[in-house]
Image: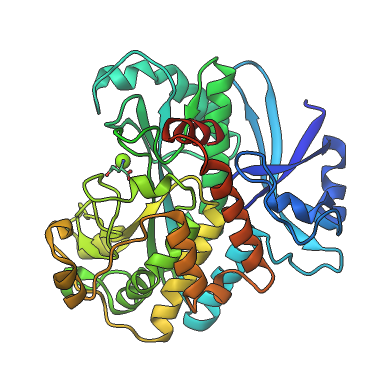
Amino acid sequence: MTAYTMICTSDFSGLLRGKGVPVADFDKRTTAGIGWTPTNVQITCFDTISDSPYGSFGDLVLRPDPDRRVIAPLPDGRRLDFALGDVFRLDGRAWECCTRGMLKAAVARLKARTGLELRVSFEHEFMFREGLPTAGFSLAGFAERLGYAEDLAQALAGAGIVPDSFLREYGPNQMEITLPPAPALLAADQAAILRDLARLVARARGEAVTFTPLIGPDVVGNGVHIHFSLWDGQGQPVTHDADRPEGLGQVAGAFSAGILRHARALCALTAPSVISYDRLVPHRWSAAFDNLAAQDREATLRICPVTSHEPAARARQFNLEFRAADAAASPHLALAALIEAGLAGIDDALPAPTATAEDLSLLSPEALAARGLRRLPESLEAALAALEADPLLPRVLPEGAVDIYLAHKRGEIAHVTPMPPEARFAAYAAAY
Ligand code: GLU
Ligand code: MG
Protein backbone atom coordinates (compact mmCIF):
# COMPACT_ATOMS: atom_id res chain seq x y z
CA MET A 1 0.00 0.00 0.00
CA THR A 2 1.37 3.37 -0.90
CA ALA A 3 0.48 6.48 1.08
CA TYR A 4 -0.13 8.89 -1.78
CA THR A 5 -1.77 9.00 -5.15
CA MET A 6 -1.04 11.82 -7.56
CA ILE A 7 -3.71 13.57 -9.62
CA CYS A 8 -2.20 14.58 -12.97
CA THR A 9 -2.97 16.69 -16.00
CA SER A 10 -1.24 16.39 -19.37
CA ASP A 11 -0.43 20.01 -20.18
CA PHE A 12 0.77 22.22 -23.03
CA SER A 13 4.35 21.05 -22.49
CA GLY A 14 3.26 17.46 -23.11
CA LEU A 15 4.29 16.47 -19.58
CA LEU A 16 2.21 15.18 -16.67
CA ARG A 17 2.00 17.52 -13.70
CA GLY A 18 -0.22 17.52 -10.65
CA LYS A 19 -0.45 17.04 -6.92
CA GLY A 20 -0.39 14.08 -4.51
CA VAL A 21 -3.16 13.28 -2.03
CA PRO A 22 -3.55 10.47 0.51
CA VAL A 23 -4.74 7.27 -1.16
CA ALA A 24 -7.60 7.08 1.35
CA ASP A 25 -8.91 10.39 -0.02
CA PHE A 26 -8.95 9.35 -3.67
CA ASP A 27 -12.72 8.75 -3.88
CA LYS A 28 -13.44 12.05 -2.17
CA ARG A 29 -11.10 13.82 -4.61
CA THR A 30 -13.00 12.51 -7.63
CA THR A 31 -15.68 15.04 -6.74
CA ALA A 32 -13.86 17.60 -4.58
CA GLY A 33 -10.73 17.64 -6.74
CA ILE A 34 -7.64 19.54 -5.68
CA GLY A 35 -6.68 23.15 -6.24
CA TRP A 36 -4.73 23.98 -9.39
CA THR A 37 -3.14 27.23 -10.53
CA PRO A 38 -3.82 28.69 -14.00
CA THR A 39 -0.24 29.91 -14.50
CA ASN A 40 0.98 26.28 -14.19
CA VAL A 41 -0.01 25.81 -17.84
CA GLN A 42 2.78 28.24 -18.74
CA ILE A 43 5.48 26.06 -17.15
CA THR A 44 7.47 24.98 -20.18
CA CYS A 45 9.31 21.71 -20.67
CA PHE A 46 12.38 23.55 -19.37
CA ASP A 47 10.58 24.60 -16.17
CA THR A 48 10.70 28.24 -17.20
CA ILE A 49 7.38 30.09 -17.03
CA SER A 50 6.21 31.77 -20.22
CA ASP A 51 4.19 34.99 -20.15
CA SER A 52 0.97 34.36 -18.30
CA PRO A 53 -2.06 36.62 -18.30
CA TYR A 54 -3.07 35.01 -15.01
CA GLY A 55 0.05 35.92 -13.08
CA SER A 56 -0.51 35.00 -9.44
CA PHE A 57 -4.29 35.19 -9.80
CA GLY A 58 -7.01 32.61 -10.15
CA ASP A 59 -7.87 29.13 -8.97
CA LEU A 60 -8.93 25.95 -10.71
CA VAL A 61 -9.84 22.41 -9.70
CA LEU A 62 -8.02 19.30 -10.91
CA ARG A 63 -10.23 16.20 -10.62
CA PRO A 64 -8.99 12.64 -11.16
CA ASP A 65 -10.81 10.31 -13.54
CA PRO A 66 -11.30 7.08 -11.55
CA ASP A 67 -11.18 5.14 -14.83
CA ARG A 68 -7.61 6.38 -15.40
CA ARG A 69 -6.10 5.34 -12.09
CA VAL A 70 -2.70 3.69 -12.44
CA ILE A 71 -0.94 1.65 -9.76
CA ALA A 72 2.35 0.72 -11.35
CA PRO A 73 5.12 -1.34 -9.79
CA LEU A 74 8.55 0.15 -10.52
CA PRO A 75 11.64 -2.06 -10.72
CA ASP A 76 13.15 -0.60 -7.52
CA GLY A 77 10.18 -1.76 -5.44
CA ARG A 78 8.20 1.49 -5.43
CA ARG A 79 4.55 1.40 -6.35
CA LEU A 80 3.57 4.50 -8.21
CA ASP A 81 -0.08 5.46 -7.73
CA PHE A 82 -1.51 8.21 -9.94
CA ALA A 83 -4.51 9.12 -12.04
CA LEU A 84 -5.11 11.36 -15.02
CA GLY A 85 -7.68 14.04 -14.56
CA ASP A 86 -9.38 17.11 -15.93
CA VAL A 87 -9.05 20.76 -14.99
CA PHE A 88 -12.22 22.72 -14.27
CA ARG A 89 -13.08 26.26 -13.35
CA LEU A 90 -14.42 26.77 -9.85
CA ASP A 91 -17.93 27.07 -11.31
CA GLY A 92 -17.64 23.56 -12.73
CA ARG A 93 -17.10 24.43 -16.39
CA ALA A 94 -14.20 22.79 -18.22
CA TRP A 95 -11.10 25.01 -18.14
CA GLU A 96 -10.25 26.27 -21.63
CA CYS A 97 -6.59 25.19 -21.33
CA CYS A 98 -7.31 21.60 -20.22
CA THR A 99 -5.98 19.43 -23.05
CA ARG A 100 -8.05 16.43 -21.96
CA GLY A 101 -11.14 18.63 -22.04
CA MET A 102 -10.26 19.76 -25.56
CA LEU A 103 -9.97 16.16 -26.72
CA LYS A 104 -13.27 15.20 -25.07
CA ALA A 105 -14.94 18.13 -26.84
CA ALA A 106 -13.44 17.16 -30.22
CA VAL A 107 -14.53 13.52 -29.82
CA ALA A 108 -18.04 14.65 -28.89
CA ARG A 109 -18.27 17.02 -31.88
CA LEU A 110 -17.13 14.30 -34.29
CA LYS A 111 -19.76 11.93 -32.85
CA ALA A 112 -22.55 14.53 -32.83
CA ARG A 113 -21.99 15.72 -36.39
CA THR A 114 -21.09 12.45 -38.12
CA GLY A 115 -22.03 9.62 -35.75
CA LEU A 116 -18.44 8.45 -36.13
CA GLU A 117 -15.75 7.48 -33.64
CA LEU A 118 -12.03 7.44 -34.07
CA ARG A 119 -9.88 4.51 -32.98
CA VAL A 120 -6.32 5.52 -32.41
CA SER A 121 -3.00 3.83 -31.84
CA PHE A 122 0.08 5.77 -30.76
CA GLU A 123 3.43 4.49 -31.98
CA HIS A 124 6.35 5.94 -29.99
CA GLU A 125 10.04 5.95 -30.73
CA PHE A 126 12.51 6.74 -27.95
CA MET A 127 16.18 6.30 -27.16
CA PHE A 128 18.31 5.08 -24.30
CA ARG A 129 20.80 7.76 -23.40
CA GLU A 130 23.57 5.17 -23.06
CA GLY A 131 24.31 1.61 -24.01
CA LEU A 132 26.55 -0.73 -25.90
CA PRO A 133 26.08 -0.33 -29.63
CA THR A 134 23.70 -2.88 -31.14
CA ALA A 135 22.39 -3.11 -34.67
CA GLY A 136 19.01 -1.75 -35.74
CA PHE A 137 16.18 -4.32 -35.47
CA SER A 138 18.72 -6.90 -34.24
CA LEU A 139 18.00 -9.72 -31.83
CA ALA A 140 21.05 -8.56 -29.86
CA GLY A 141 19.56 -5.08 -29.58
CA PHE A 142 16.25 -6.52 -28.44
CA ALA A 143 17.96 -8.82 -25.94
CA GLU A 144 20.01 -5.90 -24.59
CA ARG A 145 16.78 -4.20 -23.49
CA LEU A 146 14.81 -7.26 -22.44
CA GLY A 147 15.13 -6.56 -18.71
CA TYR A 148 13.85 -3.05 -19.30
CA ALA A 149 11.05 -4.33 -21.55
CA GLU A 150 9.90 -6.75 -18.86
CA ASP A 151 10.01 -4.12 -16.11
CA LEU A 152 8.12 -1.71 -18.33
CA ALA A 153 5.52 -4.38 -19.16
CA GLN A 154 4.91 -4.84 -15.41
CA ALA A 155 4.50 -1.12 -14.89
CA LEU A 156 2.22 -0.75 -17.92
CA ALA A 157 0.08 -3.64 -16.68
CA GLY A 158 -0.65 -1.43 -13.68
CA ALA A 159 -2.28 0.94 -16.16
CA GLY A 160 -4.10 -1.86 -17.97
CA ILE A 161 -1.81 -1.36 -20.98
CA VAL A 162 -0.45 -4.27 -23.01
CA PRO A 163 1.70 -2.94 -25.87
CA ASP A 164 1.04 -4.12 -29.38
CA SER A 165 4.78 -4.33 -30.09
CA PHE A 166 8.19 -3.53 -28.60
CA LEU A 167 11.23 -3.43 -30.85
CA ARG A 168 14.76 -2.26 -31.35
CA GLU A 169 14.35 0.56 -33.88
CA TYR A 170 17.07 1.65 -36.25
CA GLY A 171 18.65 4.71 -34.55
CA PRO A 172 21.39 4.47 -31.91
CA ASN A 173 19.88 2.86 -28.78
CA GLN A 174 16.46 3.54 -30.28
CA MET A 175 13.41 1.50 -29.32
CA GLU A 176 9.79 1.61 -30.38
CA ILE A 177 6.57 0.79 -28.56
CA THR A 178 3.19 0.71 -30.26
CA LEU A 179 0.00 0.69 -28.24
CA PRO A 180 -3.09 -1.20 -29.41
CA PRO A 181 -5.95 0.75 -31.05
CA ALA A 182 -8.35 2.34 -28.59
CA PRO A 183 -11.02 5.07 -28.53
CA ALA A 184 -9.35 8.48 -28.86
CA LEU A 185 -9.44 9.58 -25.21
CA LEU A 186 -8.17 6.26 -23.90
CA ALA A 187 -5.45 6.21 -26.56
CA ALA A 188 -4.21 9.70 -25.64
CA ASP A 189 -4.34 8.89 -21.93
CA GLN A 190 -2.33 5.74 -22.51
CA ALA A 191 0.21 7.63 -24.63
CA ALA A 192 0.77 10.12 -21.80
CA ILE A 193 1.03 7.30 -19.25
CA LEU A 194 3.41 5.31 -21.46
CA ARG A 195 5.88 8.19 -21.80
CA ASP A 196 6.14 8.80 -18.08
CA LEU A 197 6.30 5.11 -17.17
CA ALA A 198 8.94 4.47 -19.84
CA ARG A 199 11.10 7.25 -18.36
CA LEU A 200 10.45 6.25 -14.75
CA VAL A 201 11.13 2.55 -15.27
CA ALA A 202 14.45 3.43 -16.90
CA ARG A 203 15.36 5.73 -14.04
CA ALA A 204 14.47 3.12 -11.42
CA ARG A 205 16.91 0.77 -13.20
CA GLY A 206 19.69 3.37 -13.20
CA GLU A 207 19.13 4.00 -16.93
CA ALA A 208 17.70 6.93 -18.86
CA VAL A 209 15.54 7.18 -21.95
CA THR A 210 14.41 10.19 -23.92
CA PHE A 211 11.48 10.77 -26.26
CA THR A 212 13.02 14.00 -27.60
CA PRO A 213 12.23 14.49 -31.31
CA LEU A 214 15.94 14.50 -32.14
CA ILE A 215 19.09 13.99 -30.04
CA GLY A 216 21.37 15.69 -32.55
CA PRO A 217 21.43 17.03 -36.09
CA ASP A 218 22.86 13.92 -37.73
CA VAL A 219 20.92 11.26 -35.85
CA VAL A 220 17.67 9.45 -36.62
CA GLY A 221 14.66 11.15 -35.03
CA ASN A 222 12.12 9.92 -32.52
CA GLY A 223 8.68 10.18 -34.05
CA VAL A 224 5.22 9.71 -32.65
CA HIS A 225 3.08 8.20 -35.37
CA ILE A 226 -0.62 8.54 -34.71
CA HIS A 227 -2.59 5.77 -36.39
CA PHE A 228 -6.32 6.26 -36.78
CA SER A 229 -9.41 4.72 -38.31
CA LEU A 230 -13.09 5.75 -38.37
CA TRP A 231 -15.92 3.57 -37.10
CA ASP A 232 -19.68 4.04 -37.28
CA GLY A 233 -22.15 3.90 -34.39
CA GLN A 234 -22.66 0.15 -34.92
CA GLY A 235 -18.96 -0.51 -34.47
CA GLN A 236 -18.38 -1.06 -38.20
CA PRO A 237 -15.19 0.22 -39.87
CA VAL A 238 -15.71 2.96 -42.47
CA THR A 239 -12.13 3.92 -43.34
CA HIS A 240 -11.81 1.46 -46.19
CA ASP A 241 -13.58 1.23 -49.55
CA ALA A 242 -12.02 -1.26 -51.93
CA ASP A 243 -13.58 0.54 -54.92
CA ARG A 244 -11.94 3.91 -54.27
CA PRO A 245 -8.34 5.00 -54.96
CA GLU A 246 -5.90 3.53 -52.44
CA GLY A 247 -8.90 1.86 -50.78
CA LEU A 248 -9.64 5.07 -48.92
CA GLY A 249 -13.36 5.36 -48.12
CA GLN A 250 -15.22 8.58 -48.88
CA VAL A 251 -15.58 9.90 -45.35
CA ALA A 252 -12.01 8.94 -44.45
CA GLY A 253 -10.88 10.70 -47.64
CA ALA A 254 -12.61 13.91 -46.56
CA PHE A 255 -11.20 13.52 -43.04
CA SER A 256 -7.70 13.06 -44.49
CA ALA A 257 -8.12 16.06 -46.80
CA GLY A 258 -9.09 18.17 -43.78
CA ILE A 259 -5.95 17.09 -41.94
CA LEU A 260 -3.78 17.94 -44.93
CA ARG A 261 -5.51 21.26 -45.61
CA HIS A 262 -4.61 22.27 -42.04
CA ALA A 263 -1.34 20.34 -41.77
CA ARG A 264 0.91 23.39 -41.60
CA ALA A 265 -1.06 24.78 -38.66
CA LEU A 266 -1.42 21.37 -37.02
CA CYS A 267 2.36 21.06 -36.77
CA ALA A 268 2.36 23.81 -34.13
CA LEU A 269 0.33 21.47 -31.95
CA THR A 270 1.65 18.05 -32.99
CA ALA A 271 5.38 18.85 -33.36
CA PRO A 272 5.69 21.79 -30.99
CA SER A 273 9.36 21.97 -30.03
CA VAL A 274 12.03 24.11 -31.67
CA ILE A 275 13.99 21.01 -32.71
CA SER A 276 10.88 19.27 -34.10
CA TYR A 277 11.64 21.17 -37.31
CA ASP A 278 15.08 19.59 -37.61
CA ARG A 279 13.19 16.28 -37.79
CA LEU A 280 10.45 17.36 -40.22
CA VAL A 281 12.79 17.52 -43.22
CA PRO A 282 13.02 15.28 -46.29
CA HIS A 283 14.83 11.95 -46.03
CA ARG A 284 14.39 11.50 -42.32
CA TRP A 285 11.47 9.12 -42.73
CA SER A 286 9.34 11.61 -40.82
CA ALA A 287 7.18 14.04 -42.89
CA ALA A 288 8.13 17.15 -44.84
CA PHE A 289 5.21 17.93 -47.19
CA ASP A 290 1.45 18.04 -46.64
CA ASN A 291 0.86 14.86 -48.63
CA LEU A 292 -0.95 11.55 -48.45
CA ALA A 293 0.77 8.43 -49.71
CA ALA A 294 0.23 4.70 -49.57
CA GLN A 295 3.03 2.95 -47.76
CA ASP A 296 5.53 5.84 -48.01
CA ARG A 297 7.25 6.52 -44.70
CA GLU A 298 7.88 10.15 -45.56
CA ALA A 299 4.26 11.17 -46.02
CA THR A 300 2.44 13.33 -43.49
CA LEU A 301 -0.47 10.91 -43.89
CA ARG A 302 0.45 7.36 -44.73
CA ILE A 303 -2.03 4.67 -45.65
CA CYS A 304 -0.73 1.68 -43.75
CA PRO A 305 -0.61 -1.81 -45.27
CA VAL A 306 -3.19 -4.44 -44.43
CA THR A 307 -2.13 -8.06 -44.21
CA SER A 308 -5.42 -9.93 -44.41
CA HIS A 309 -6.89 -11.10 -47.72
CA GLU A 310 -10.38 -11.40 -46.29
CA PRO A 311 -12.50 -8.29 -47.11
CA ALA A 312 -14.10 -7.78 -43.67
CA ALA A 313 -10.75 -8.20 -41.90
CA ARG A 314 -9.08 -5.82 -44.38
CA ALA A 315 -11.69 -3.19 -43.59
CA ARG A 316 -11.03 -3.58 -39.86
CA GLN A 317 -7.25 -3.37 -40.29
CA PHE A 318 -7.26 -0.42 -42.65
CA ASN A 319 -5.80 2.68 -40.99
CA LEU A 320 -3.88 5.85 -41.69
CA GLU A 321 -0.90 7.22 -39.84
CA PHE A 322 -0.12 10.89 -39.14
CA ARG A 323 3.68 11.12 -38.99
CA ALA A 324 4.34 14.82 -38.35
CA ALA A 325 4.06 14.39 -34.58
CA ASP A 326 6.48 13.95 -31.72
CA ALA A 327 6.48 13.56 -27.97
CA ALA A 328 6.93 17.27 -27.27
CA ALA A 329 3.20 17.44 -28.01
CA SER A 330 0.46 16.72 -25.55
CA PRO A 331 -1.12 13.58 -27.03
CA HIS A 332 -4.51 15.02 -26.08
CA LEU A 333 -3.98 18.33 -27.81
CA ALA A 334 -2.41 16.71 -30.88
CA LEU A 335 -5.33 14.33 -31.26
CA ALA A 336 -7.95 17.00 -30.60
CA ALA A 337 -6.37 19.06 -33.37
CA LEU A 338 -6.30 16.13 -35.82
CA ILE A 339 -9.97 15.37 -35.12
CA GLU A 340 -11.03 19.00 -35.61
CA ALA A 341 -9.08 19.25 -38.86
CA GLY A 342 -10.53 15.97 -40.10
CA LEU A 343 -14.03 17.03 -39.12
CA ALA A 344 -13.57 20.32 -40.99
CA GLY A 345 -12.73 18.21 -44.04
CA ILE A 346 -15.95 16.20 -43.60
CA ASP A 347 -17.99 19.39 -43.01
CA ASP A 348 -16.65 20.85 -46.25
CA ALA A 349 -17.08 17.54 -48.12
CA LEU A 350 -13.49 17.73 -49.34
CA PRO A 351 -12.47 15.21 -51.99
CA ALA A 352 -9.89 12.65 -50.93
CA PRO A 353 -6.31 13.81 -51.46
CA THR A 354 -4.52 12.32 -54.46
CA ALA A 355 -1.85 9.99 -53.16
CA THR A 356 1.74 10.86 -54.05
CA ALA A 357 4.19 8.19 -55.09
CA GLU A 358 7.54 9.90 -55.48
CA ASP A 359 10.24 11.81 -53.63
CA LEU A 360 8.61 15.24 -53.32
CA SER A 361 11.89 16.90 -52.34
CA LEU A 362 12.97 16.52 -55.99
CA LEU A 363 10.07 18.64 -57.27
CA SER A 364 10.48 22.36 -57.90
CA PRO A 365 8.35 24.75 -55.82
CA GLU A 366 6.30 25.40 -58.98
CA ALA A 367 5.68 21.70 -59.56
CA LEU A 368 4.65 21.26 -55.93
CA ALA A 369 2.33 24.26 -56.09
CA ALA A 370 0.76 22.97 -59.31
CA ARG A 371 -0.22 19.83 -57.41
CA GLY A 372 -1.44 21.77 -54.39
CA LEU A 373 1.38 20.49 -52.19
CA ARG A 374 3.21 22.57 -49.61
CA ARG A 375 6.29 22.10 -47.52
CA LEU A 376 5.50 21.72 -43.80
CA PRO A 377 6.74 24.67 -41.70
CA GLU A 378 10.50 24.83 -41.34
CA SER A 379 10.55 26.29 -37.83
CA LEU A 380 8.33 26.36 -34.76
CA GLU A 381 7.82 30.08 -35.25
CA ALA A 382 6.60 29.45 -38.82
CA ALA A 383 4.26 26.72 -37.53
CA LEU A 384 2.87 29.08 -34.89
CA ALA A 385 2.32 31.74 -37.55
CA ALA A 386 0.47 29.16 -39.69
CA LEU A 387 -1.63 28.24 -36.66
CA GLU A 388 -2.47 31.85 -35.90
CA ALA A 389 -3.54 32.40 -39.51
CA ASP A 390 -5.64 29.22 -39.75
CA PRO A 391 -9.42 29.46 -39.35
CA LEU A 392 -9.30 26.05 -37.64
CA LEU A 393 -7.59 27.52 -34.60
CA PRO A 394 -10.71 28.57 -32.65
CA ARG A 395 -12.13 25.07 -33.10
CA VAL A 396 -9.12 23.41 -31.53
CA LEU A 397 -8.08 25.90 -28.88
CA PRO A 398 -11.07 27.54 -27.21
CA GLU A 399 -11.19 31.27 -26.75
CA GLY A 400 -8.76 32.26 -24.06
CA ALA A 401 -6.45 29.32 -24.72
CA VAL A 402 -5.08 30.61 -28.04
CA ASP A 403 -2.96 33.46 -26.72
CA ILE A 404 -1.80 31.33 -23.84
CA TYR A 405 -0.61 28.50 -26.08
CA LEU A 406 1.17 30.92 -28.40
CA ALA A 407 2.84 32.67 -25.44
CA HIS A 408 3.84 29.31 -23.97
CA LYS A 409 5.59 28.29 -27.15
CA ARG A 410 7.15 31.70 -27.78
CA GLY A 411 8.58 31.62 -24.26
CA GLU A 412 10.08 28.22 -25.06
CA ILE A 413 11.57 29.58 -28.29
CA ALA A 414 13.07 32.54 -26.42
CA HIS A 415 14.64 30.19 -23.88
CA VAL A 416 16.48 28.02 -26.41
CA THR A 417 17.26 30.62 -29.08
CA PRO A 418 20.48 31.87 -27.42
CA MET A 419 21.76 28.30 -26.98
CA PRO A 420 24.28 26.75 -29.36
CA PRO A 421 22.66 23.83 -31.25
CA GLU A 422 24.27 21.10 -29.10
CA ALA A 423 22.93 22.69 -25.92
CA ARG A 424 19.49 22.98 -27.48
CA PHE A 425 19.37 19.29 -28.40
CA ALA A 426 20.67 18.39 -24.93
CA ALA A 427 18.04 20.54 -23.23
CA TYR A 428 15.20 18.85 -25.12
CA ALA A 429 16.70 15.40 -24.51
CA ALA A 430 16.70 16.13 -20.78
CA ALA A 431 13.17 17.56 -20.86
CA TYR A 432 11.56 14.67 -22.74
N1 GLU B 1 12.35 7.68 -36.95
C1 GLU B 1 11.39 8.11 -37.94
C2 GLU B 1 10.67 9.36 -37.46
O1 GLU B 1 11.32 10.23 -36.97
C3 GLU B 1 10.39 7.01 -38.28
C4 GLU B 1 10.96 5.72 -38.78
C5 GLU B 1 9.87 4.72 -39.06
O2 GLU B 1 9.47 4.01 -38.12
O3 GLU B 1 9.31 4.71 -40.14
O4 GLU B 1 9.48 9.52 -37.58
MG1 MG C 1 9.50 3.43 -36.23
Task: List x then y, in percent, for residue 264.
Answer: 39, 66
Q: Nearer the viewer, residue 333 or 408?
A: 408
Residue 121 appears anywhere in the view: yes
In this rendering, is residue 410 above or below 341?
above
Residue drawn where x is 37% and y is 63% of the image: 229
Task: List x then y, in percent, for residue 32.
Answer: 87, 54
Taking the view exactly as shown, the residue that stands out farthest to the bottom is 348
In this rendering, is residue 91 above or below 254?
above
Task: List x then y, in percent, for residue 92.
Answer: 82, 67
Say whether residue 63 is left or right of residue 170: right
Residue 181 appears anywhere in the view: no
In this rendering, is residue 123 above or below 74?
below
Q: Nearer the viewer, residue 378 or 202?
A: 378
Taking the view exactly as shown, the residue that stands out farthest to the front is 418
Residue 47: quadrant of the picture: top right
Q: Quadrant of the N terminus?
A: top right
Quarter of the render that holds ligand 2? top left
Say whether residue 153 is left or right of residue 90: left
Residue drawn where x is 33% and y is 36% of the image: 217
Residue 400: quadrant of the picture: bottom right
Say whether residue 325 is left or right of residue 310: right
Residue 69: quadrant of the picture: top right
Task: List x then y, in percent, for residue 371.
Answer: 18, 75
Q: Nearer the viewer, residue 283 or 113?
A: 283
Residue drawn where x is 21% and y is 46% of the image: 283
